[in-house]
Image (cartoon, rainbow, N blue to C red):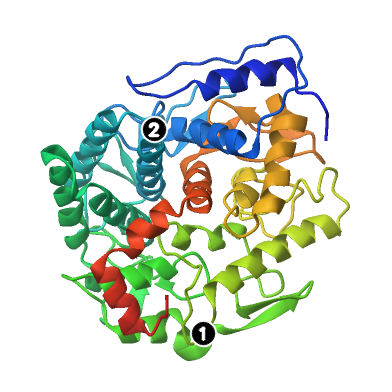
Amino acid sequence: MQSGISNYYCLFIILLLGYACSDGHSQETHSQAAETDAKLSDEALLDTLQKQTLRYFWDAAEPVSGMACERIHSDGIYPQNDQNVVTSGGSGFGVMGIIAGIDRGFIDRSAGVTHLHKIMHFLETADRFHGAWPHWWYGDTGKVKAFSKYDDGGDLVETSFMAQALLCTRQYFKEGNENERALAAKADQLWKEIEWNWYQGPEKDNIIYWHWSPNHDWKMNFRITGYNECMITYILGVCSPTYPIPVEAFHEGWAKNGDIVGGTSKYGHKLDFTHIGAKEYGGPLFWAHYSYLGLDPRKLSDQYTNYWDHNYNHTQINRQYCIENPHDYKGYGDNCWGITSSYSMKGYASHKPERDLGVIAPTAALSSFPYTPEESMKVLRHLYEDMHDKVIGPYGPYDAFSEEHDWCLKRNLAIDQGPILVMVENYRSGLLWKLFMSCPEVQEGLTKLGFSY
């Protein structure tokens, strides 16, 4: 680790530490200053990381809807022609991040509430499909943008990521002033309007289908089974007070009548679950993040596994793979690890140890702070103190980089920046975990499913 910090980095951090967003959208730029040996404490560096990633969902939000843009290009290589495309799941992560920003004083509370009202209005008036939202919309019109040829309707998995955020919003503001209580009530209404049982498919059997389209009906035919990032979809479906799925769907559909159990052991770390398409190393690391932004894994267990142990082991396997570095990629190591789906030299790719292109995605290690705080801090310091302007932009670390290929795309994705912001907050305070787990319907649903928590 270098003893000094670059000229660029010093003033950039000073500016960001003063950033509060209290009057709207800040416009700091990269600057240079005299070299210094001063270093930020762990807490100050985590503040900086959260403030930067928050900017994605605050400063750079789509202006009409208030929602998170699917992607933001900072490279200037060519004009970005989809700046009005917003994402449901990534916006859910952003809503949770905005709550964290309000709680830490990074955002003025009243301004935050106003922004969240704008998002709730969009969610209420934009295209919905039996209460579920699509993967993408045009933020300026609220009309669905097809994710693929037949995926132009409801996306229940992305909807579940937003539903986590709605419940956290309700719990955080329900005892506030009149405007805040109205916000909480709207979030509650939107949550209760999601028709989870509709997505049991044409046969209404004990499984959930990912997609439904008013134009193509069930043609996508994507039946959700585990283990991957989708556990929260089944849990929320069972928890719904208005349109619930049966408890049996979790065990028969998600857990495949127990066949979800199998797993592997690697580097002395055991995985109880067989991860879809990744039987040896546990698959992309975002599977340990998305379902657990609100769902607290610390004491969570059921008949199939202990979820804290499972996620910890998944993270350690991913990390140890990078340290072992079987392909001898440049840059991999104890302070530079984390393989998950992200941009790559070949476009967006589902990276995992079984499909390793030499690309590190910062979201993998940084969103793992609750599981591996010391190991993730090494990565954070390496990114900011050693690599700094090569991999850090206005919204925090860029989406992905490869030292092996001397490549870093100066772009960000909502689904990668959001989990950093939220999981770092859960590591620091447990805020989003506390909010989500305080929901009576969540507690009732988990009990019905046989969870201890």
Quarter of image, res 396: top right
Task: Classify residue 118 by image quadrant.
Answer: top left
Kind of residue at disc 1: Tyr
Residue 187 in the image, given as x and y percentages of width and height: 20, 51
Q: Is residue 239 above or below residue 37?
A: below
Q: Position of residue 151 (x, y in %)?
A: 36, 56
Question: The residue under label 2 is which amino acid type?
Answer: Gly
Q: Residue at image x 64%, y 33%?
A: 409
**Residue 65 is at least partly visible in this image:** no
Q: Please give the residue where the numbered disc 2 appears in the rendered image.
A: 105
Residue depth check, mark 1 versus mark 2: number of the one nearer the observer: 2
142 relative position to 70: left or right: left
Q: Residues within 10 Å of mark 1 (few under 14, many from 20)?
A: some
Residue neighbourhood size for the residue with mark 2, other residues' Cα within 10 Å, grouped as few (<14), some (14–19), many (≥20): few
State the quadrant of the N terminus: top right
Residue name at image x 20 percent, y 58 percent: 131
Alpha carbon distance from label 1 to label 2 = 40 Å
Task: Give SS at disc 2.
Answer: loop
Residue at 36 percent across and 72 percent down: it is 234
Query: Looking at the rendering, in which quadrant would you find the C terminus?
Result: bottom left
Residue beneath disc 1: 304
Q: In this image, 155 relative to 330: left or right?
A: left
Q: Which residue is at a point 66% across and 30% down the rendered structure image?
A: 40
**Residue 324 image offset from top left, x and y in percent:** 85, 60
